[in-house]
Amino acid sequence: MKTERVFIIAEAGVNHQGSLDTAKKLVDAAKEAGADACKFQTFRADSIISRFAPKAGYQERTTDPKESQLAMVRRLELDKKSHEELFRHCGKRGIVFLSSPFDIESVRFLNDLGLAIFKIPSGEITNLPYLREVGRLKKKVVMSTGMATLQEVGAALEVLIGCGTKKKAITVLHCNTEYPTQPEDVNLRAMLTIRDRLGVKVGYSDHTLGIEVPIAAAALGAEVIEKHFTLDRDMKGPDHHASLLPDELKSMVDAVRIIGKAMGDGKKKPSESEKKNMAAARKSIVAARDIEKGETFTAENVTVKRPATGVSPMRWDDVIGKTAVRRFREDEPITV
């Protein structure tokens, strides 16, 4: 089993409130926390949301319930110039710029911008024209699967692969699209089901409060972790409440990095650091009392004690019944 560094996406999303200055501060915070990428969302509100579309329940709880979903999302758009500036800013800071496109026009714009990785949001997993557009780019794809069945995930994969994207270039993120997600709704083992049943790389996009679940996902083998963060949970907007603060994001990143190191290569063998302790911790077959030359070794006159500088106790049956070729003092390692 090959070990890979977990790719951590700090999800800024729309937590910039439509402000380029705030978006840049989010990039800076993601970089300081040690994330690999800072991700935003690219869309034209009027292209993706009907004026009759209601808000999701969590959006009504965190924003003005009298405001329409369309009006809310309009305020959270970033224009093309802002995207270009953020792309350059991420390059200067040494962090990957990512953004989830929510319509075909946005897919094409991000491709022209130079994105090497395309993040498919959960809501687009059943959008056939959209999936075809992404699949034809033949880029790396990270696809979230909130609200989806295994069959829907498989169908989306078939579209992407059928359009030219290589299966090995796709990472599927298990996800629950509720903000915040309750622990009992996470179903983290589903990530492993996706991996084993569909034969793809997997990761986890988290919407729970806290950092415990993404850390657990890393321990289970997630190759990508995505987590929302914000500069201030008291800001007005749909996602701030379920987002980490910058110091919490750093704690999550640090913990995931430790888990990544701890995962190892899967081979069961002594590590270099513990080899020096083997002699002190293991045991040898030794004389339980003084044994005279010519005496037969028995369970009464030999025993097992530290250190492991003599014959291994695993050879006990080879020793019992043999004859002492010389005199052994009590506690002296037996030789045969």
Image: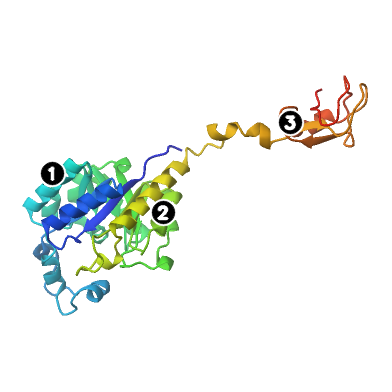
Kindly tell me whether residue 133 is visible in this rendering: yes
Whole-number angstrom distance, CA of label 3 to CA of label 1: 63 Å
Graded by Cα atoms within 10 Å as few (under 14), some (14 to 19) or many (20 or more), the crowding at tag 1 reads few
Taking depth in this image into account, of 54 and 15 the one nearest to the observer is: 15
Is residue 150 positioned above or below 276 on the image?
Answer: below
For the residue marked with disc 3, what is the amino acid? Ser
Colouring scheme applied when the structure was drawn: rainbow
Q: Secondary structure at mark 3?
A: loop
Whole-number angstrom distance, CA of label 3 to CA of label 2: 40 Å
Position of 170 with respect to 288 (left or right) is left
Mark toward the start of the polypeptide (3 vs 2): 2
User: In this figure, which residue is indicated by the disc labeled 3?
Assistant: 312
Q: Position of residue 59 (x, y in %)?
A: 23, 72
User: In this figure, which residue is indicated by the disc labeled 2?
Assistant: 215
Labelled disc at residue 61: none
Position of 291 with respect to 114 (left or right) is right
Taking depth in this image into account, of 247 and 82 the one nearest to the observer is: 247
Quadrant of the image occupied by residue 56: bottom left
Mark toward the start of the polypeptide (2 vs 1): 1
For the residue marked with disc 1, what is the amino acid? Arg
Q: Position of residue 176 (x, y in %)?
A: 34, 63
Q: Secondary structure at mark 1?
A: helix
Taking depth in this image into account, of 114 and 125 the one nearest to the observer is: 114
Graded by Cα atoms within 10 Å as few (under 14), some (14 to 19) or many (20 or more), the crowding at tag 2 reads many
User: In this figure, which residue is indicated by the disc labeled 1?
Assistant: 88
Mark toward the start of the polypeptide (3 vs 1): 1
Rendered-image quadrant of the C terminus: top right
Position of 133 with respect to 257 (left or right) is left
Q: Position of residue 210 (x, y in %)?
A: 37, 62
Q: Outermost residue, top direction?
A: 325
